[in-house]
Amino acid sequence: MTVRDDNLVAEEARAIEVGNETGGSPEEHKQRDSWTSRTGFILACVGSAVGMANIWLFPYRVAQLGGAAFLIPYLIFVLLLGFTGVIGEMSFGRATGAGPMGAFAKAMEMRGVKNGRVIGKIIGLIPTLGSLAIAIGYAVVLGWACNYLVASLDGELMAQTDMGAFFGAIASDFGNVGFHLLGLAITFIIMILGVSRGIEKVNKVLMPTFFVLFVIIAIRVATLPGAAAGYEYLLIPRWEALLNPTTWVYALGQAFFSLSLAGCGTLVYGSYLKKDVDVVSSARNVAIFDTIAGLVAACVVVPGVFAFGLDVSSGPPLLFITLAQVFQEMPFGSIFAVILFVAVVFAAITSLMNLFEAPVEALQAQLGLPRAASVGIVAVAAVAVGLFLEGGSTVSDWMDVISIYVIPVGAFLAAVMFFWVCPKGFAKQQAELGREKPLGNWFTFMTRYVFVGITAVVIVLGIFYGGIG
């Protein structure tokens, strides 16, 4: 990069820092809430990444697509996406001090596009509304988990003679309103407290607890007669699976969606990040712990299902029917059912906070609303739409549409804005803040060409396969 390019990047960075050159509203430049520690930020990002995909999809993918052989393409894509996309979204948010709408607007202004601020905000609505939409559907699943947790506590779950019918009654139109609203209420109460006093503090408790609880269950499952067959099926690589393109497609989808690449949640979390934090090591830690969560879940699900001769299905039936039946037949199963659904509720809440944060931040920054009012507006939208999605097939269709057509598009737009629209060298400079060693020249090539290309491929494959994550 030339001296002139270096100066341009530095000037644009200073303009964003002070906010005077970007034409932003005074509200956007008020003191923003921020993470109080790097650990808090990492745990919050891990919380956003660790969710239902780790629990009911990752074990199924590993078991069905080559066992340990599936981990090869999966880990390749985690490494690739973690060191490009995750770093990019964290850095983009931090560089602009804004969520998708504000970040896209500032990127367009830096490019010198006429009416760029307005255009950027309009484009930024796509990932923002996508985040809200997927959160509304996700809240339905949190409501199911809350219901199962209470049912496991009072003994109702263990007394069921037909677990499929029990779940079917819950996952029906207006069949779980009370627990649905309970899950939303817990999430929004935490969010009203803010980033540092609410989201960060809660993630510092819930995420470590989630891992501890799942390890406890994994240890218990390991003692079950017949569990060894499950470990064998899970851990012995079936190398022929690597010759199947579908294995690589679903490994890409699992890595992409599990790392929360959507141009919204990770970006907005990054906007609350201090300049002295190393986002490269933060992204690495998020990828590591997200992968560990999936592996631990697999070591619970597959051996447990094998121990009782059940089917390793995917999606909600695995968690709410198959695993519930496993605990019914397991000695002291009621205790471990409680542990499981506590962990599931924790994972769902931490993911949901991340998804709702993008629209909340947009209302605060773009309309100048107080945080409580912004959370309240989002809560009303979540209830008004979500109650009509409680049927299992309805929410499944809703989530499929958003995850196939909106979420990867949001990731693609954020990547284009940061790596192409912002001045040349700007993304690399922002990613290097807080690091002792500069990033190599690989970063520019891998982000501008490889990662942007991958996001486009994810969009196409998602449509072709009817969803890959």
Image: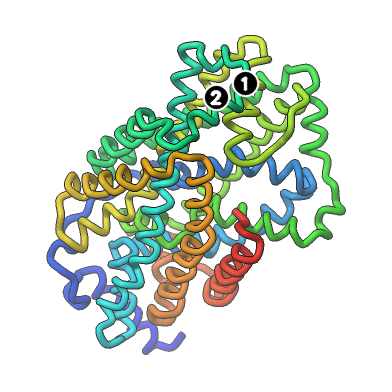
Amino acid at pointer 1: Asp
What residue occupies the far front of the structure in this picture?
A: 173
Query: Quick check: 396 above or below 444?
Result: above
Q: Residue at x 77, y 37 (%)?
A: 234
Q: Which residue is drawn at 43% across and 78% down?
A: 425
Q: Quadrant of residue 52?
A: top right
Q: Are marks 1 and 2 in contact (CB under 8 Å)?
A: yes
Q: What element carries label 2?
A: helix
Q: What element carries label 1?
A: loop
Question: Left of 294 or right of it: where is 306?
Answer: right
Q: Position of residue 279 (x, y in %)?
A: 44, 57
Residue 78 disc label: none
Q: Mark 1 points at which residue?
A: 162
Crowd class of label 1 (few under 14; some 14 to 19; many from 20; radius 10 Å): few
Question: Left of 257 or right of it: where is 265?
Answer: left
Is residue 43 at least partly visible in the picture?
A: no
Q: Residue at x 34, y 84 (%)?
A: 111
- Measure how far apart labels 1 and 2 are at the Cα level: 6 Å
Q: Name the residue under label 2.
A: 166
Q: Where is residue 47 in the image (x, y as percent from the top left)?
A: 45, 42
Q: Nearer the viewer, residue 319 or 51?
A: 319
